[in-house]
Image: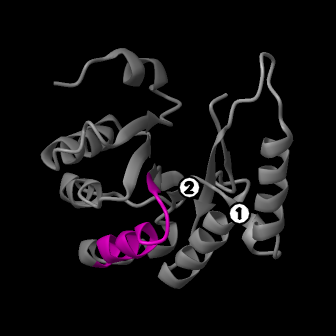
Amino acid sequence: AGGIAIGVHATQFAIRDVGLYQPVLELAMQAARDWVPIGGKRPLFMVAGLAGRTQQAVREARIAQQLGYHGGLLSLVAMKDASEDELIAHCRAVADVMPVIGFYLQRAVGGVDLPASFWRRFAEIDNVVAIKMAPFNRYRTLDVIRGVVAARAEERVTLYTGNDDHIVLDLVVPFT
């Protein structure tokens, strides 16, 4: 594996509710630092889940950055009632602290439907490094790609698929 993401899955969101966000991130970072793969030492790209409204997400980003995490996977679930302008302001505030990975989560688990215009504006944020696409909707996945291309960020923003229902095709079908 080239990296580890901590506190990013629906089953891990609850660590925040019981005060375990920082201890879990600390433990994972220590384990990653102690890990020696076959063939020698190789650093892992460490990703921390970032959630909540802006104040909480910024606080989590500061914790992750202080612990040595390289990026934060930003959930927008807590912001689902926000306007596009409010969402972009939220993302910018977090990106001011650390590199951000967008997280397009499926609606069935609290995700928000986001248009290509949002993804264009999101990809224009300098400290956005990637987007994990997991809306489980082919057309919404295409909205992300259209937005990244419209922002002329396709060389800077890495796209990951989390569409378990479409992973192989997401990986092999060219987008033009």
Q: Quadrant of the N terminus?
A: top right
Disc 2 crowd rating (10 Å Cα; few below 14, some 14-19, many 20+) is few
Work out whether residue 147 or residue 167 is closer to the camera in this orientation and state it.
147
Residue numbers of the magenta segment: 86-102
Q: Report the amino acid beneath label 2.
A: Val
Q: Name which residue lies at 68% across and 37% down.
A: 43
For residue 155, side relative to residue 1 (left or right) = left
Report which residue position mark 2 lands on: 109
Give the x, y percent position of residue 127: 37, 59
Q: Name which residue lies at 17% across and 50% down.
A: 151
Q: Secondary structure at mark 1?
A: helix
Q: Name which residue lies at 34% across and 72% down.
A: 87
State yes or no: residue 99 in magenta.
yes
Asked if residue 149 is positioned above or below residue 125 in the image, the reply reads above
Asked if residue 132 is positioned above or below residue 69 in the image, the reply reads above
As measured in the structure, the alpha-carbon distance from the residue carrying label 2 to the one carrying label 1 is: 28 Å
Residue 132 in sight: yes
